[in-house]
Each structure stands twice: as C-alpha cells, then as structure tokens.
Image (cartoon, rainbow, N blue to C red):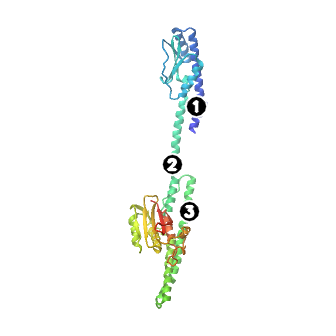
Amino acid sequence: MQMVVTYMFFNAHWTTVTASLSDSVAADIGLTVELYQQTPSLERASNLDTMMRPHMELSVVLVEDEELPTANRRAFFSVLDKTLQNSLHQSLQETFWFDTTRYPNHIDIRVDVEEGTLRFIAPRERVFARTGFVFIFWLILASVLLTLVSILFIRNQARPITKLAAAADAFGKGQDIENFKPSGAAEVRLAGQSFLKMRRRISRFMDQRTAFLAGVSHDLRTPLTRLNLHLAMQEDNEDTRAARADIKDMESMLNGYLDFARGLTDEESSQVELGSFLNGVIEKCGAPKPELIFDANINVSVKPIAMVRALTNIISNAQKYGNTIRIQTDTHTKPLQIIIEDDGPGIPESQYLEVFKPFYRIDSARNQNIDGTGLGLAIARDIIRSHGGTIKLSQSSMGGLCVTVNLPG
C-alpha cells in the first residue's frame, strides 16, 4: 500500500511540481541568454547578474573562452535530470550543460555562447520540489513504526493461540494441562474455555466408563469366585475341567474389559531409553522371543506401564500366529517408528481398520480357536493415541502382519 501511495504521489504531484519549477528556471535562463545576446559582453553579463540575483535567485557569470564540459554527472534519481533536461531543451536554442550533483543546495547550468560560457547557479529548491524527499522519509519512518507495532500486536495475539495449540497437543498425549489458562482476544479466550469444557466432558466420560466396567467386573467376580470354589469341591472329571476353563476365560475377558475401559490414563509420562525399554518388554514376553533391531538408543517420553501393555498386546498377538517375530526401530524419522513383524498368516487388507474395533475377531485369516477377547489391538491403539502417536497395519516382508507404531520424538 505504501509503495502504491508513493508511486501515485510521485506521478500525480511531485513530478508535476518539479516539472513546473524546472520550466520556470529554464524560462528565466532562456530570457537571460536572449537579453545577453542583444549586446554580448562581460559588462552585460554583470548587469544581468545584478538584475537576476535578487529577484529570481539566479547567478549569472560569463566565463570567456571556456568550452562546455564533456563529462556528464547524473543524480541518483535520474528523473530530476530528465525533467530539467526537457525544460532546458524547450527554452534554449543554444547548447547547454548542467550538473545537479556537485553542490548540495545549488544547480550548475552552463550555456554555450560565442564569447565563452554563460554560467548560471540556481538554488536547488527553485528547480526541484524538495518536499518529495521529506515525504519519502516520513513514509519510510511511518512504515517501519507500523511494521514494529504490527509485529508486536500479532505476536501478542498469536501467543495465546500457540498456548492453546500446545495444551491441545499435550491433552492428546495424556499429559497434564492444569496450568493452561485462556488468554488473549475475546475469541481466543472463548476457544480456550470451550477446550477446557471439552476436556472436562471427556475426562468425566472416561471416569464414568471406567467406574461402570469396574463395577460390572467386581459384581461378576463374586459369583465366579463362588463357582470356582464349588468346582474345586467337585470330582476332577472332563465336565469339571471344561467348566473351570470356561470360568478362566470369563475372568480373562473381565480383565480385558477393565483394561480397555481404564486405559491407564492416570499414569505420568517419563523419559526412558528406547533400547533398554524394548529389551525390558521382550524379557517379559514368552516364547517365541522377538528379535530386536534398533538403530539408536535415544530417550523418548512415554507412560511406561501403559506403553508396556500396548507393545505386549501387539507382540502377544504376533506370538499367537507366528513363529518368528522381529522388532525394529527407526529413530531418524519424525515421528520415530517401532515396527513389529511376524511370519504368520497375516490378515486381509480390507480388515486393517476392523481389527481395531473392540471385540472384533477374525475367523477367516487366523485361527478362530486361539484364545483372546478381541481387545488387544483396541487397547494398544488407545494407549498409543494417548501418547499422541498412531498405529497402522501393513503386509510384513516376512509374510505375516506388520504393525508400525509412530510416536512423537
């Protein structure tokens, strides 16, 4: 906008005023030369100087036997020289030369005559509109000041938005955001307050879900305990063993439901060494033991117990269907990756999203007689999402399933 204003000013005002001033000086010089040509002499030039200097601020000197300079010295703003050049061409028939750069406050103009050179010294303000430079100075100063004010204003307005984004990101990773307070413009404060209300509703929903399933689990454990005691007093036969197996499955399912509802959201994040952490997870796993390949032992922020459960669920799932499990890390990417592969039968690509649904079981691609509640991957995805990460499935290079866990660095 400032550039457009400057351009319009120079074209509509400054150039026009400068051209008028140059025309006026050029006309005075033309008149003086014409008067000199009537009776050319050194005395005539002196009389003209006496006449022109007080009234028109124009100094006239005849330098006898002097030729016009051949070197041209141009001003930084060439438009100044062009304007004066055009005005002098219109007013003078004689050859002329001028210099707008030698003196800071005057213009040197020379006209070729038979006796030598008529030299004119005119004040710069008579030739050019000097207010143009003042205008540019104040325009630049105002632009700099407005830019600084705008930067400060925008930074102050953007800071609360940045804090809100950081709080939302921390909440998505399950971290504490108790210190977050809405601030900034009214609209930003409203967004922050809405975010806090949403957080409270989500937390309340999670607490209610956990309490509900914990209550159901507790209520069902009592009759299951009675059944276990009753079966323990019965004879050890095929029917009794089958009933005990059913009760064990029911207890396993109840524990899975409770784990899924709880999600271990109350755990605090801490820094762990990735390599040591994965080795600890593998040590807790049964056979077949996964092979670990990691590129760098870096520190990551996780909820240790929750992440152990998530990775254990994924590894256990691979152990059920494969004989060889491999765990790889890629810490050079953002986010960092933990890749778990097996050589099992895999699952169809069309069911990659379905297997994350709670209680979903695959009968066609994997053995339907294998124990499980269908909650392992659902729990793992909830935990990984609570860390701000993602989990995706793909075809393994080993022929089975490849599970890629992406975690923020």
Label 1 environment density (alpha carbons within 10 Å; few <14, some 14–19, many ≥20): some
Disc 3 to disc 2, C-alpha distance: 27 Å
**Amino acid type, label 2:** Arg
Could you tell whether 82 is left or right of 292 in the image? right
* Numbered disc 1: secondary structure: helix
**Where is mark 3, residue-wise?**
198
Q: Which residue carries the number 1 mark?
A: 10
| Label of residue 309 in the image | none
Q: CA distance from mark 3 to mark 1?
A: 57 Å
Q: Nearer the viewer, mark 3 or mark 1?
A: 1
Answer yes or no: is residue 70 visible.
Answer: yes
- State the SS at label 3: helix
**Residues tagged 3 and 1 counted as in contact (Cβ below 8 A):** no
Judge by depth and name the residue closer to the eye, 157 or 338.
338
Quadrant location, the C terminus: bottom left
Q: Disc 1 to disc 2, how far (Cα)?
A: 35 Å
Q: Which residue is mark 2?
A: 155
